[in-house]
Amino acid sequence: MKPSQAPAGETLSKARLRVWLKLLKSVNGIETEIRRNLREEHGTTLPRFDVMSALARFPDGLKMSDLSSYLKVSNGNVTGIVDKLTEEGLALRVAVPGDRRAQVARLTAKGRAAFEELAQHHEDWINTLLEGLSAGNVDALSAHLDCILDRQMEED
């Protein structure tokens, strides 16, 4: 039996568990590699990349609370990262008219340029990590993962 083959007579439940463990191992390995690449090649972190990525998707900016909700992290985590990005001239905060407590964060032109470079390297790393997958494999895997994500959305 190859390590990737299920034992004969394995139940669907056990096969799904095996798939979950493979997904988890794959994702953890890819994330570890991304974190290493960001740290070693760009002197940055994955959480910082995630914040910049979110702000790049919303050029008009995001309220800090919306940014933390979008990233599914605490306000404190986002605040520290945005503070550092602001100090470096990569982001700025703007007060929300009519709401003294709220601020919108957005990337500066310098921040957008820095993120575009990071994003291209990120895409290249992912492409290299997944180069063993054909276009058909990618389409099939994507469709299967969509089924899982759709199911999760139904439960939320």
Image: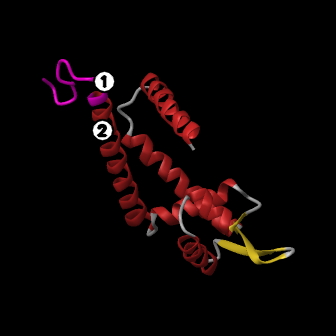
As helix, strand or loop, the secondary structure at mark 2 comes to helix
Task: Give the image location of residue 93, x and y in percent.
Answer: 72, 75
Task: Write down the region rendered in magenta.
Answer: 1-14
Q: Quadrant of the N terminus?
A: top left
As helix, strand or loop, the secondary structure at mark 1 comes to helix
Separation of disc 2 and disc 1 at Cα? 15 Å
Q: Residue furthest front?
A: 155
Q: Is residue 2 magenta?
A: yes
Residue found at x 43% / y 45%:
126
How packed mark 2 is, by other alpha carbons closer than 10 Å (few <14, some 14-19, many 20 or more), is: few
Q: Can residue 112 be seen in this snapshot?
A: no
Which three-letter amino acid code belongs to the residue tagged 1? Leu
* In this picture, residue 17 sits left or right of residue 152: left
Task: Give the image location of residue 98, x and y in percent.
Answer: 87, 74
Q: Residue furthest left?
A: 1
Residue found at x 40% / y 55%:
34
Q: Can residue 80 be seen in this snapshot?
A: yes
* In this picture, residue 62 sits left or right of residue 51: right
Foreground pick, 101 / 36? 101
Above or below residue 56? Residue 23 is: above
Residue found at x 57% / y 78%:
84
Which of discs 2 and 1 lies nearer the camera? The answer is 1
Which three-letter amino acid code belongs to the residue tagged 2? Lys
Q: Residue furthest right?
A: 98
Identify the disc placed on residue 12: 1
Q: Which residue is mark 2?
A: 22
Main secondary structure along the magenta-highlighted residues: loop
Task: Give the image location of residue 40, x and y in percent.
Answer: 37, 65
> Would you identify the image quadrant in which residue 150 lies?
top right
> Would you identify the image quadrant in which residue 85 lies?
bottom right
Total numbered badges shown on the rendered structure: 2
The numbered mark, 2 or 1, whose residue comes first in the sequence reads 1
